[in-house]
Image: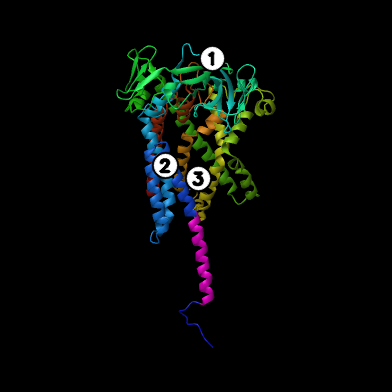
Amino acid sequence: MSTVAPSETPPRATTSHARELNRWWVVKLAVMALLNAGLLYAAYSALMVQEWAILGFTAVLLVVVNWVYVSRRMVPAKYLLPGIVFLLVYQVFTMGYTAYIAFTNYGSENTIRKDQAIEQILRTGDVRVEGAADLPLAVVRDEAGDLGFAVVVDGVVQAGTAEEPLEPVGGATVGGNGAPEEVPGWTVLNLGQILEVQSEVTALRVPFSDDPADGWVRTQTGSVGFQSSPRYSYDEATDTFTDLTTEVVYTPNDRGFFAAPDGSRLTPGWPVTVGFENFQRMLTDSRISSALLQAGAWTFAFAFLSVATTFFLGLFLAMTFNHPGVRGRKVIRSLLILPYAFPGFLAALVWRGMLNNPYGFINSTILGGADIPWLTEEWLARFSIIAVNLWLGFPYMFLIATGALQAVPGDVYEAARLDGASAFRQFRSITLPLLMISVAPLLIASFAFNFNNFNLIYFVTEGGPNIPGHPLALGETDILISVVYKVAVVAGTKQYGLAAAMSIVIFLIVGLVSWLGFRQTRKLEEVL
């Protein structure tokens, strides 16, 4: 009878192990193929739009990913690489890009590159060609759903879109009014459909050819078109625009616009570096500085009161239901954390409806038709914000306080009782200090969260009630982050550079408060 030496592997086990390795190798190959395909597509997209920084990062990432996951020696890196990539993309890049924007005039009029701005000015700056005959026209859509024009030029039906110049269409028919009636490959819109997209139709420009000098077809009625030609010519050698109707020359200025000697300028522009101008505006512009001071004071008060109220209510409930004499503690604890289980934005919207005056549930039902302006009076609105945040936040504090209390040794309380300490003295000298060691970092994190709690402000009051006549449409319950939102999005002229500078200031404030808080926490640990 043959025997198998202890150092040898049975043939059947070896075969099974080999099959398992082959199976995992195929899975790994498929995952790597998908990952490489995604990265190559991202690199190709960055190349098409000439985003060289993104292209470089994607190329480096492509090389590193394949090197790490193909090499057998890079075992630790296989686990660290995903986290590092997400850190770079979602934290480092975001912070760096925000810092870059803060030193530019990036805004609603300066959002694209200079070459894109030049192309946009050439495409949108046009005048009607004098003496040109009207063109019978029909508004059409191509198979992709893009709007276009079908016109009759010298008896031939031609069709095109803003991106595709006019091309003859075979088999097209012309109606009794001389306009195209049926255009193969295109859908002709009727009057009702044209009215639904009237603004898009009147803004549409369909080029005659790939050369912008040949002009475009435009329409104001949707049935008759006219030929327009470029109003401006661009000289690449001198980097200037010339108005062909007035001979005025526009040169690039330090604000990212082509400007004339009289100060008029062509739009759009492009972002340029403005140094510390956005930060200076926060101090020198009275409209902005007053808004930041008022919102800043309320932001600190809101964040502090939110943390204090939720913590002490959560701690009170935790101490109450931590007592062994309370019956049904598990059920009650489960019910108390229900607000924490609801999505925050949905709960805020529900509370906004309940606090509505006069139709909200609180006024109309609970208070019997009372007329209390919970959301439209300054101090009541602030009280409502704190109250809603208390309802949303106390379950979290209740959970962490419950866990911290259960970690406090029972013999400490026994020794205190033997020494004659009252219940309040035990809380002040034992419970609270021991609790703060483990809870203080979470309280600091909660303060930072509420300092930027945009969702609650936006969904409950939208920052209101509004301050009459304020140029930034500031409200009484606006916090700093909602002021940033109003500057960047709500204001008539969007100022993303200024908003980014304000965001950096908020980041520095939160960072300073967090650093001071952690420093005090370490001192508490040393004392105890």
C-beta proximity under 8 Å, tags 3 and 1: no
Secondary structure predominantly adopted by residues drawn in magenta: helix
- The x, y position of residue 480, in whole percent, is 45, 29
Q: Which residue is mark 2?
A: 91
Q: Looking at the picture, how far across and down is residue 222, in whole percent?
A: 58, 18
* Disc on the earlier residue, 1 or 2: 2
Residue tagged by mark 3?
Answer: 427
Write down the region rendered in magenta: 10-30
Left or right relative to 338: residue 433: left
Residue type at tag 3: Phe
What's the distance in space between the residues labelled 3 and 1, CA to CA?
Answer: 89 Å
Residue flagged by tag 1: what amino acid is it?
Answer: Asp
Q: Is residue 418 above or below residue 43?
A: below
Q: Nearer the viewer, mark 3 or mark 1?
A: 1
Q: Which of the two labelled residues, at mark 3 and mark 1, occupies the earlier sequence position?
A: 1
Q: Residues within 10 Å of mark 1 (few under 14, many from 20)?
A: some
Q: Nearer the viewer, residue 496 or 170?
A: 170
> Along the polypeptide, which appears first: circle 3 or circle 2?
2
Q: Amino acid at mark 2?
A: Gln
Q: Which mark is residue 134?
A: 1
Give the Cα distance between marks 3 and 2. Answer: 41 Å
